[in-house]
Amino acid sequence: MAIHYERLKARAFPTVEQSYTWKDSALYALSVGYAGDPLDERQLGFVYEQGGEPQVAAPTMPVVLATPGFWVREPDTGIDWVNMLHGEQSLVIHRPIPPAATVVSRNTIKAIVDKGRGRGALIVQERVLYDKATGDALATLENQSFCRGDGGFSESGDNGPAGGDPAPAARPAPPARSPDHVVDLATLPQGALLYRLCADLNPLHADPKVARAAGFSQPILHGLASFGIAGHALLRACCGYDPGRLVQMGLRFSSPVFPGETLRTEIWKEADRHQFRVTALERGVVVLTNGTAHIINTNDQETTT
């Protein structure tokens, strides 16, 4: 069964609601490396209940809130989900993420790109997260999925426009100079087992037999866990652990991460943004690349990137 452009583009997602507590916020923060130094009081506020709640939630926490689930497995999508990869992820934070709240999300398919037969397709999905109590938008998330087995769906001429939708703009490559900041954060050997309690229960991240069947020597870390670790590195190097300063980040996934590896985040300060990439230090493999971030100065709300 092939992708049906019109039906997939118009797919109606149910509104997703989730209530979470300060413990959920603390668990997420621990799973992406906060409080690795328990004496660092700047990090302690993400994981320690002060007066009943943590002071703050990690700014990347929206990636695990009110998710639509693994909807691509549903037969009516026409997607060859077995050959689907998470290609890129971006996050825009409109308001500080509360450490405890009830949130709702609205999900849409923004674009379906036909790269051609044998070259795959791209599906761009948007999720907007709202605070149920106030109606305020908290964050907008966009993910690009690369569907390796679904290229050529538009070639018949009666299944959407030729080539599908226009392809998203390419993410900028890292500068060809030494980085301005370097942050090394160790992942835990049990890191994938910890992170899966926040969101994705895929056995690929827990069961060695499943991981070996998928071609890996051991369970791999969730891609969105490495996304959160990159956000942690940005918060450490550029924001003084003030979560209100990180208001946007996006990146491309380039290689899996194995729990227990050290992730080195290299950060460049450019005229209008920060750029970054992440390397699994022990293997010398780039795992996240073409990263960008928007960081503000909370004193005057002027861009400092």
Image (cartoon, grey):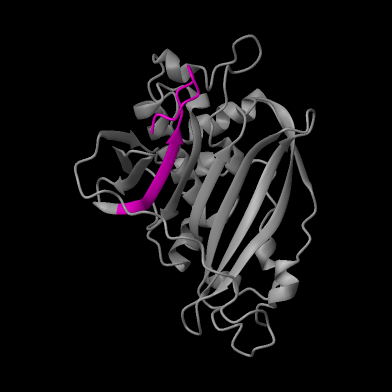
Q: Nearer the viewer, residue 1 or 247?
A: 247
Left or right of residue 162, residue 262 in this image: left
Judge by depth and name the residue closer to the eye, 303 or 78. Answer: 303
Residue sitting at the far bottom:
156
Residue 160 can be seen, yes or no: yes
Q: Residue at x 60, y 15 (%)?
A: 49
Name the residue: 69% across, 61% down.
Answer: 71
Q: Is residue 76 visible?
A: no
Name the residue at 48% across, 19% down: 300
The answer to which image quadrant residue 292 occupies is: top left
Percent x, y for residue 269? 31, 36
- Check if residue 299 falls in the magenta segment: yes
Instruction: Answer above or below: position of 98 versus 118.
Output: above
Q: Residue furthest top?
A: 51
Q: Is residue 160 left or right of residue 189?
A: right
Q: Quadrant of the N terminus?
A: bottom right
Which quadrant holds the C terminus?
top left
Magenta part of the chain:
286-305
Is 11 magenta? The answer is no
Q: Position of residue 288 (x, y in %)?
A: 38, 51
